[in-house]
Image (cartoon, grey):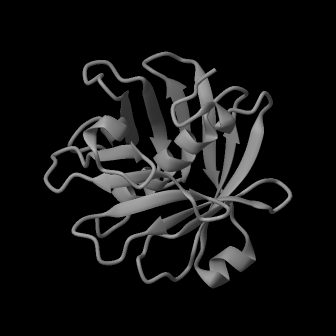
Amino acid sequence: MVAVVGPQFCAPYTMALTVTKKAFSWSGGDFNVSDVHGAVLMKVQGRYLSRHSHRVLCDAAGTPIISMRKKLISWHNTWKVYRGDSSDKKDLLFTAKRSHMMQLKTNLDVFLSGNDRICDFKVKGSWFERSCTFYLGDTNTIIAHMSREYSLKNVLLRKDTFGITVYPGVDYALIVSIIVILYEIQKPDS
Protein backbone atom coordinates (compact mmCIF):
# COMPACT_ATOMS: atom_id res chain seq x y z
CA MET A 1 0.00 0.00 0.00
CA VAL A 2 1.21 3.50 -0.90
CA ALA A 3 -0.41 5.74 1.74
CA VAL A 4 1.13 9.21 1.96
CA VAL A 5 -1.85 11.44 2.72
CA GLY A 6 -3.73 8.64 4.51
CA PRO A 7 -4.88 5.01 4.21
CA GLN A 8 -8.50 6.18 3.79
CA PHE A 9 -7.49 7.32 0.28
CA CYS A 10 -6.16 3.89 -0.73
CA ALA A 11 -8.81 1.71 -2.38
CA PRO A 12 -8.25 -2.06 -2.72
CA TYR A 13 -9.30 -1.80 -6.39
CA THR A 14 -8.34 0.29 -9.41
CA MET A 15 -9.99 3.72 -9.18
CA ALA A 16 -11.08 5.77 -12.16
CA LEU A 17 -11.31 9.47 -11.31
CA THR A 18 -11.96 12.64 -13.26
CA VAL A 19 -10.24 15.91 -12.39
CA THR A 20 -11.87 18.97 -13.92
CA LYS A 21 -10.33 22.43 -13.86
CA LYS A 22 -13.08 24.99 -13.50
CA ALA A 23 -13.33 27.26 -16.53
CA PHE A 24 -13.47 30.38 -14.38
CA SER A 25 -12.46 31.05 -10.81
CA TRP A 26 -11.26 34.15 -9.01
CA SER A 27 -8.27 32.33 -7.55
CA GLY A 28 -7.39 30.55 -10.79
CA GLY A 29 -6.80 27.24 -9.05
CA ASP A 30 -10.14 25.50 -8.57
CA PHE A 31 -10.65 21.83 -9.52
CA ASN A 32 -13.29 19.16 -8.85
CA VAL A 33 -12.43 15.48 -8.42
CA SER A 34 -15.22 13.01 -9.12
CA ASP A 35 -15.67 9.24 -9.37
CA VAL A 36 -17.04 7.31 -12.38
CA HIS A 37 -20.62 8.04 -11.25
CA GLY A 38 -20.02 11.80 -11.19
CA ALA A 39 -20.03 12.12 -7.40
CA VAL A 40 -17.62 14.81 -6.21
CA LEU A 41 -15.04 13.25 -3.87
CA MET A 42 -12.70 16.22 -3.46
CA LYS A 43 -12.27 19.83 -4.44
CA VAL A 44 -9.17 21.92 -4.90
CA GLN A 45 -9.47 25.56 -3.91
CA GLY A 46 -7.02 28.30 -4.77
CA ARG A 47 -6.24 31.04 -2.28
CA TYR A 48 -6.81 34.31 -4.12
CA LEU A 49 -4.89 36.82 -2.05
CA SER A 50 -2.02 34.63 -0.86
CA ARG A 51 1.61 35.80 -1.15
CA HIS A 52 2.40 32.87 -3.44
CA SER A 53 0.63 30.02 -5.19
CA HIS A 54 -1.40 28.17 -2.59
CA ARG A 55 -3.88 25.38 -3.31
CA VAL A 56 -5.90 23.38 -0.78
CA LEU A 57 -7.29 19.89 -1.45
CA CYS A 58 -10.55 19.48 0.49
CA ASP A 59 -13.01 16.64 0.91
CA ALA A 60 -16.50 16.98 -0.60
CA ALA A 61 -17.70 18.83 2.53
CA GLY A 62 -14.90 21.42 2.23
CA THR A 63 -12.65 20.17 5.05
CA PRO A 64 -8.96 20.71 4.17
CA ILE A 65 -7.01 17.48 3.56
CA ILE A 66 -3.70 18.93 2.32
CA SER A 67 -2.29 22.27 1.21
CA MET A 68 0.11 22.79 -1.69
CA ARG A 69 2.44 25.78 -1.61
CA LYS A 70 4.90 26.90 -4.26
CA LYS A 71 8.33 27.97 -3.05
CA LEU A 72 8.83 31.62 -3.87
CA ILE A 73 12.31 31.19 -5.30
CA SER A 74 13.19 27.88 -6.92
CA TRP A 75 15.12 26.82 -10.01
CA HIS A 76 13.10 23.61 -10.31
CA ASN A 77 9.60 25.02 -9.63
CA THR A 78 9.35 23.36 -6.21
CA TRP A 79 6.11 22.77 -4.32
CA LYS A 80 5.74 21.74 -0.67
CA VAL A 81 2.69 19.78 0.43
CA TYR A 82 1.43 19.84 4.03
CA ARG A 83 -1.25 18.05 6.05
CA GLY A 84 -4.46 20.12 6.38
CA ASP A 85 -4.20 23.83 5.62
CA SER A 86 -0.86 24.04 7.40
CA SER A 87 2.54 25.36 6.37
CA ASP A 88 4.29 24.11 9.51
CA LYS A 89 7.43 22.03 8.92
CA LYS A 90 6.12 19.25 11.20
CA ASP A 91 3.11 18.82 8.84
CA LEU A 92 5.20 18.48 5.66
CA LEU A 93 4.15 15.36 3.70
CA PHE A 94 6.19 15.68 0.52
CA THR A 95 8.01 17.97 -1.90
CA ALA A 96 7.50 17.91 -5.68
CA LYS A 97 9.77 19.54 -8.22
CA ARG A 98 10.76 19.39 -11.87
CA SER A 99 13.58 16.91 -12.44
CA HIS A 100 15.56 19.47 -14.47
CA MET A 101 15.46 23.25 -14.76
CA MET A 102 14.86 23.09 -18.51
CA GLN A 103 12.96 20.13 -19.91
CA LEU A 104 10.93 19.37 -23.02
CA LYS A 105 9.08 16.38 -21.59
CA THR A 106 7.29 16.29 -18.26
CA ASN A 107 9.53 14.94 -15.50
CA LEU A 108 8.56 15.53 -11.89
CA ASP A 109 10.27 14.09 -8.81
CA VAL A 110 8.40 13.62 -5.53
CA PHE A 111 10.27 13.29 -2.23
CA LEU A 112 8.57 12.25 1.00
CA SER A 113 9.22 14.36 4.09
CA GLY A 114 12.72 13.78 5.46
CA ASN A 115 14.05 12.50 2.12
CA ASP A 116 15.76 14.77 -0.40
CA ARG A 117 18.17 12.45 -2.18
CA ILE A 118 16.30 9.68 -4.01
CA CYS A 119 12.79 10.38 -5.28
CA ASP A 120 9.98 8.28 -3.84
CA PHE A 121 7.72 8.85 -6.86
CA LYS A 122 8.38 10.03 -10.40
CA VAL A 123 6.07 11.39 -13.08
CA LYS A 124 7.01 11.09 -16.75
CA GLY A 125 5.12 11.98 -19.88
CA SER A 126 4.09 14.81 -22.11
CA TRP A 127 2.04 17.65 -20.65
CA PHE A 128 1.46 18.98 -24.17
CA GLU A 129 -0.28 15.69 -25.02
CA ARG A 130 -1.78 15.63 -21.47
CA SER A 131 -0.56 12.12 -20.83
CA CYS A 132 1.60 11.23 -17.83
CA THR A 133 2.51 8.06 -15.98
CA PHE A 134 3.27 7.91 -12.24
CA TYR A 135 6.00 5.55 -11.04
CA LEU A 136 7.13 4.25 -7.68
CA GLY A 137 10.55 5.90 -7.31
CA ASP A 138 13.06 5.27 -10.08
CA THR A 139 11.48 1.91 -10.92
CA ASN A 140 9.22 0.75 -13.74
CA THR A 141 6.39 0.09 -11.27
CA ILE A 142 3.39 2.11 -12.45
CA ILE A 143 1.06 3.39 -9.73
CA ALA A 144 -1.23 5.70 -11.78
CA HIS A 145 -1.83 7.15 -15.20
CA MET A 146 -3.35 10.45 -16.34
CA SER A 147 -4.70 11.45 -19.75
CA ARG A 148 -6.67 14.40 -21.01
CA GLU A 149 -10.33 13.84 -21.80
CA TYR A 150 -11.66 15.61 -24.84
CA SER A 151 -15.32 16.42 -25.33
CA LEU A 152 -17.18 19.11 -27.22
CA LYS A 153 -18.62 20.43 -23.94
CA ASN A 154 -15.14 20.79 -22.40
CA VAL A 155 -13.78 22.55 -25.50
CA LEU A 156 -16.72 24.98 -25.66
CA LEU A 157 -16.58 25.71 -21.93
CA ARG A 158 -12.76 25.90 -21.98
CA LYS A 159 -12.46 23.29 -19.23
CA ASP A 160 -9.48 21.04 -18.75
CA THR A 161 -10.59 17.53 -17.82
CA PHE A 162 -8.24 14.70 -16.94
CA GLY A 163 -9.01 11.01 -16.57
CA ILE A 164 -6.98 9.28 -13.90
CA THR A 165 -6.45 5.60 -13.30
CA VAL A 166 -5.11 4.93 -9.80
CA TYR A 167 -3.88 1.40 -9.14
CA PRO A 168 -5.05 -0.61 -6.11
CA GLY A 169 -3.56 0.43 -2.78
CA VAL A 170 -2.27 3.77 -4.09
CA ASP A 171 -3.19 7.02 -2.32
CA TYR A 172 -5.47 8.84 -4.76
CA ALA A 173 -5.22 12.11 -2.76
CA LEU A 174 -1.45 12.00 -3.44
CA ILE A 175 -2.03 11.47 -7.18
CA VAL A 176 -4.62 14.28 -7.40
CA SER A 177 -2.32 16.72 -5.60
CA ILE A 178 0.55 15.88 -7.97
CA ILE A 179 -1.72 16.50 -10.97
CA VAL A 180 -2.69 19.92 -9.57
CA ILE A 181 1.01 20.73 -9.07
CA LEU A 182 1.79 19.59 -12.63
CA TYR A 183 -0.98 21.83 -13.92
CA GLU A 184 0.41 24.80 -12.01
CA ILE A 185 3.99 24.14 -13.17
CA GLN A 186 3.03 23.67 -16.82
CA LYS A 187 0.55 26.51 -17.26
CA PRO A 188 1.83 29.23 -19.61
CA ASP A 189 2.19 32.05 -17.04
CA SER A 190 4.15 29.85 -14.62
Q: With respect to residue 190, does 154 lie above or below?
A: below
Give the quarter of the figure containing the N terminus. Answer: top right
Q: With respect to residue 23, does 44 lie above or below?
A: above
* Quarter where residue 171 is shown: top right
Q: Residue at x 38, y 52 (%)?
A: 68
Asked whether 147 or 82 is in front, the reply is: 82
- Residue 152 appears in the rendering: yes
Residue 64 location in percent, x, y? Answer: 51, 57
Q: Residue furthest top?
A: 139
Q: Please indicate whether residue 138 sits to the left or right of residue 134 in the image.
A: left
- Residue 104 appears in the rendering: no
Q: Please indicate whether residue 88 sits to the left or right of residue 140 in the image.
A: left
Give the quarter of the figure containing the C terminus. Answer: bottom left
* Quarter where residue 63 is shown: bottom right
Q: Residue at x 44, y 30 (%)?
A: 122
Q: Residue furthest right?
A: 37
Q: Residue at x 67, y 36 (%)?
A: 8
Q: Please indicate whether residue 59 sits to the left or right of residue 182 in the image.
A: right
Q: With respect to residue 147, does 121 lie above or below?
A: above
Asked whether 139 or 181 is in front, the reply is: 181
* Quarter where residue 105 is shown: top left
Residue 108 location in percent, x, y? Answer: 38, 38
Residue 179 location in percent, x, y? Answer: 50, 50
Number of numbered labels in the structure image: 0
Q: Residue at x 47, y 55 (%)?
A: 180
Q: Please indicate whether residue 177 sits to the left or right of residue 190 in the image.
A: right
Asked whether 124 or 137 is in front, the reply is: 137
